[in-house]
Image: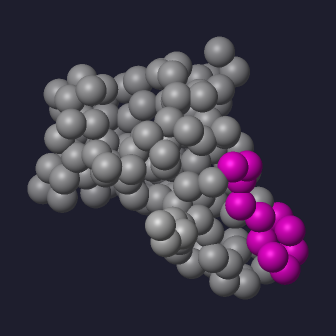
Amino acid sequence: MPPKVVESSVVKCPHCGRNNRVPKAGTGAPRCGECHESLPWVVDAGDEDFAEVAEAARIPVVVDFWASWCGPCRMVSPALQQVATELAGQIKLVKVNIDEAPETSRRFGVQAVPTLVVLRLGRVVAQRAGAAPAPALREWVRDALAG
């Protein structure tokens, strides 16, 4: 059997500007190969890889259930990216398009988008629906991680 190919993306380090290859799934949290600072970990997942990408993660995961036709989803996306950058090394942001991942969306009871879920070791520790600005999202995530 051929070896499994690990999907990855290139992330620019917000500290030194170096491009780094970051895996979609893996243990720990990604760090810059140049300055060794934590990198924001933002990935997409669907029905076929959600368990590996989100539920098996060792660090807390913020799941963003969204849709391309959803205006509030487009508004909250940059705020979530900002929170993922500010909390780099502490969280992983996993984006799930509900139209492309209906089984995962159904499993989490998503009835409105955006819906945000915080997972710790695969278990739901917080859930909310609706858009919010970055400061409110940061506080919500920190409260979920503290609880």
- How would you classify the magenta stretch by its main secondary structure? loop
Q: Is residue 30 left or right of residue 23?
A: right
Residue 71 on image: x %, y %: 19, 53
Q: Is residue 29 magenta?
A: yes
Query: At 28% across and 57% down in the image, what residue appears?
Result: 74
Residue 106 on image: x %, y %: 20, 29
Residue 133 on image: x %, y %: 44, 44
Determine whether 28 is above or below 141 in the image. below
The reply to whether residue 138 is in sight is no
Q: Is residue 129 left or right of residue 39?
A: left
Query: At 84% across and 80% down in the image, what residue appears?
Result: 34
Q: Is residue 91 magenta?
A: no
- Observer-nearest of 101 and 93: 101
Determine whether 3 is above or below 68 in the image. below
The reply to whether residue 57 is in sight is yes
Determine whether 19 is above or below 47 in the image. below
Q: Which residues are magenta?
A: 27-37
User: Which residue occupies the extreme top position in the image?
Assistant: 147
User: Which residue occupies the extreme bottom position in the image?
Assistant: 18
Quarter-of-image position of residue 69: bottom left
Query: At 37% across and 26% down in the image, what residue appears?
Result: 128
- Observer-nearest of 84 and 33: 33
Residue 79 on image: x %, y %: 46, 52
Determine whether 138 is above or below 77 in the image. above
